Structures are given as C-alpha cells and as structure tokens.
C-alpha cells in the first residue's frame, strides 16, 4: 500500500519534511481526533494523518473533487487503500470559503492547503481558525515558499493580530514550507 511519502515522491505536493510537520503534531493528539484539510490534492495530507491517528475522522474539502482527477486525485488514492471504506474520511466537494461559513464541528487539527491567492489564505484563516479547539493545531502549507511569498506574510499578519492582547496561536514547528501552530486559547471554541 502506498504511503504519504510515496505520494510525496510521486506527485510532489508535499516534501517529506513537510509530511513530518503534520506527523509531529499528531503525536500530541488523541487517536479519535477530528481533522479538516482544505485542499485534497493527491491526498498526501490525508495519508500522513491516517497513518498516525487510528480512529481519526478526517474531513477533506476540495473545490475540484471529481472534476479534475489528475490534480485532485485524493479519491483515487484512497480507493487503493482500506481507508476508502473505513468511514474515516469524509470528502466534501466544495469551496472552503463557502463550506466554512456554517461549519459546526470543532476541530483538533486544521490543515490549510487550498487556494493560494492572498485573499484565499486570508479567508481560510478567518473562516476556519475559529473552528479549532484549544490545544488543537493549525498547519499551513507553502509558508515561505518562493512561488507564493504572500502566504507567509498573510499567515504572519493573521497570527500577529490574533495574538493581541493574549497569545492564542503558539508557533510549534516549521520545516520546508510547512508551519504548525497550536491554539493556546480558542478563538471560537
Ligand atoms: C496544492 S493542492 C493540495 C495538496 C494536498 N494537500 C495533498 O496533500 O496532496 C491544492 C488543492 O486545493 C484545491 N482548492 C483550491 N481552491 C480551493 C477552495 N477555494 N476550496 C477548496 N479547495 C480548493 C485545489 O483543487 C487543489 O486540489
């Protein structure tokens, strides 16, 4: 069965050190956590989480699900594994900026890797970080990447603002272009 590292080597959405930032966060989470990822892609994030959290409920939101199988092929990769019928992955075909508006399930981990425009990142942070529980993780991809320099500035600005007057998001780890934070105080939960 393919692993998250195999998907990394094949489809190149995430590097091995970036996968390890996700896996590192799972060490502090319970096996039955609720995780949501914006941007299904090849399912690399999904595999990274599923490999570590046995009873996870993983929500995957992608605007292109089923419409472009080459770039958004998480469903095909899952079909090759026992994860597919396990009920552990709930795949949502939609725009994260709409899905996030009335979301009601508190999250133990949020992974942001969807639209990479400045406004996309701003909106994903604004809509989704409030759904992360105290002690939960927020993980952003393409932070400090050369291709999308505004991801870093947008995330930095959000974290700076949210941390006033008290620290709510604590920096945990940064490797390659993946960065993780932990919620010390909730924004919404
Ligand atoms: C870089 S890929 C994600 C890679 C993936 N995280 C992985 O582990 O393989 C970005 C994905 O975000 C999706 N996307 C772009 N804008 C989106 C939006 N507004 N809402 C949901 N998904 C979006 C794209 O369709 C694409 O599948």
Image: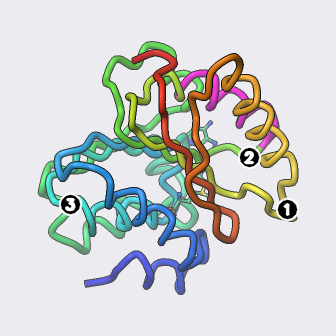
Q: How many residues crowd around disc 3 within 10 Å: few (fewer than 14), some, or many (20 or more)?
A: some
Nearest to the eye among marks 3 and 1: give it.
Answer: 1
- Which residue position holds label 3? 84
Q: Badges 1 and 2: C-beta atoms under 8 Å apart?
A: yes
Magenta residue span: 117-128
- Residue 93 appears at what percent x and percent y? 43, 38
- Which residue position holds label 1? 147
* Mark earlier in primary sequence (3, 1): 3
Left/right placement of residue 12 relative to residue 90 reads right
Q: Is residue 71 above or below residue 152?
A: below
Q: Badges 3 and 1: C-beta atoms under 8 Å apart?
A: no
C-alpha gap between disc 3 and disc 2: 28 Å
Residue at 40% in and 41% down: 36
- Residue 128 appears at what percent x and percent y? 53, 27
Which quarter of the figure is the C terminus placed in? top left
| Element type where label 1 sits in the image | loop
- Residue 90 appears at what percent x and percent y? 28, 43
């Amino acid at each position: 069965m393919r692993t998250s590292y195999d998907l990394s080597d094949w489809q190149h959405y995430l590097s091995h050190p970036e996968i390890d930032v996700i896996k590192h966060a799972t060490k502090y989470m319970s096996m039955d956590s609720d995780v949501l990822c914006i941007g299904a892609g090849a399912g690399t994030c999904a595999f990274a989480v599923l490999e570590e959290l046995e009873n996870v409920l993983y929500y995957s939101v992608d605007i292109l699900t089923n419409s472009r199988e080459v770039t958004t092929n998480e469903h095909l990769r899952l079909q090759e594994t026992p994860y597919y019928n396990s009920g552990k992955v709930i795949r949502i075909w939609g725009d994260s900026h709409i899905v996030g508006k009335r979301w009601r399930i508190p999250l133990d981990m949020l992974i942001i890797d969807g639209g990479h425009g400045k406004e996309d990142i701003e909106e994903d942070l604004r809509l989704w970080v409030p759904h992360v529980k105290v002690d939960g993780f927020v993980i952003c991809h393409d932070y400090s990447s050369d291709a999308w320099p505004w991801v870093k500035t947008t995330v930095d600005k959000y974290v700076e603002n949210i941390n006033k007057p008290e620290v709510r998001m604590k920096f945990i780890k940064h490797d390659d272009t993946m960065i993780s934070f932990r919620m010390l105080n909730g924004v919404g939960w």
